[in-house]
Amino acid sequence: MSETSTSLIRRLRGRPMALAAAGTALALAAPIPASASAAAPDPVSVLKYTAKERKEALAYWTTARIKAVGKSVDLGPSGPKAKPYKGVALKTVGRLFFVNAKGADTWCSATAVKSANRSAVMTAAHCVRMGSSPGNTNTTMVFVPGYNKGKKPYGVFAVRTAATPRAWVNDSTNDMAALVVDTDKSGKKLTDVVGGQPIAFNRPVGGTVSALGYSATSPQLGEELLRCVGKTKKEHGTQVIPCDLTGGSSGGPWLADFSATTGKGTLVSVNAALDSLVPTKMYGELLGATAKKVYDRAQNG
């Protein structure tokens, strides 16, 4: 089944509660001076998949299995804001298939981005691992760019490493991730095949963006790319747009200055959380200094 709306809502509702609890703790406890010799903790956590695991992932995600996972969940009718994407083939955006920490087949959405190694993909941290639970990680992960109604026109790429903020691992905050994928079966690197969207860090909130993803709503059931268009604003320490994409769209891109004629834009966030079981808002992280470190760890990996 897909990443469900309920889990997305829990993350959103947990954020202000967690901040309140942290604030209380800080108010009650005096700061502890750092040791002069103590090294600052690495703000980035990286999962690595072995060559054997990557080979098994490619064999695991057969056409039949992909078809079955799409039929395994129906989160209700697609909302009025999320419309089928119409435009030039969007090669860079695709479905991210994996087995979650509970052992279930599932999927998220993800985006090929420009990077030094020509192999980086952006998605949400909860598509990689459970928050606040270091041992619960997802496995058997592959990226299928340009996925559409069972077609995989640009191949399948096994995920080699997955970087997330350590804040997500420990505290379920900063829900974004950067992946590195292997070459395809002919030895070509990802962005040499599909291109890559540029990323903007520390971009001011307020512009119009397109949020895209493979929502597990009917009639699409993850088989087609859906798109919301809205103007961003700040809320709950994140950014938000009016959108009713739901489970399965997690990790899909927020593209500013997007053109459906060229398929190009600038990635400014990813789908991270919803406001309710019948969503009207989509939340995405502000991509700041830590997000840049996560991305750099991937693009230099």
Image: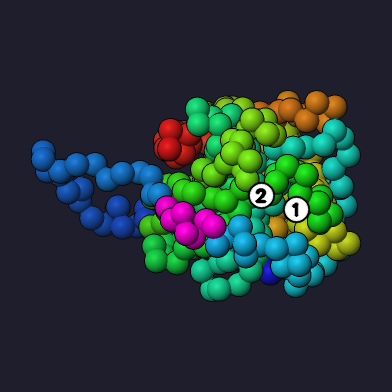
Quadrant in the picture for residue 42: top left
Q: Position of residue 188 (x, y in %)?
A: 61, 36
Between marks 2 and 1, how big is the CA–CA gap?
Answer: 16 Å
For disc 1, the marked residue is 214
- Helix or strand or loop: what does disc 1 sit on? loop
Which region is colored magenta? Answer: 47-55
Question: In percent of the image, x 78 and y 30: which residue is there?
Answer: 263
Mark 2 and mark 1 residues within 8 Å of each other at the beta carbon: no
Question: In percent of the image, x 81 and y 51: which residue is there?
Answer: 151
Q: Would residue 77 be seen by someone viewing this image from the given angle?
A: yes
Question: In percent of the image, x 46 and y 39: which residue is there?
Answer: 298
Horizontal side, residue 107 vs residue 129: left or right: right
From this view, report whether residue 94 is shown above or below residue 202: below
Q: Quadrant of the N terminus?
A: bottom right
Which residue type does callout 1 highlight? Tyr
Q: Position of residue 169 (x, y in %)?
A: 41, 56
Q: How many marks?
A: 2
For disc 2, the marked residue is 156
Q: Position of residue 187 (x, y in %)?
A: 59, 39
Question: In percent of the image, x 76 and y 49: which residue is there?
Answer: 152
Which residue type does callout 2 highlight? Val
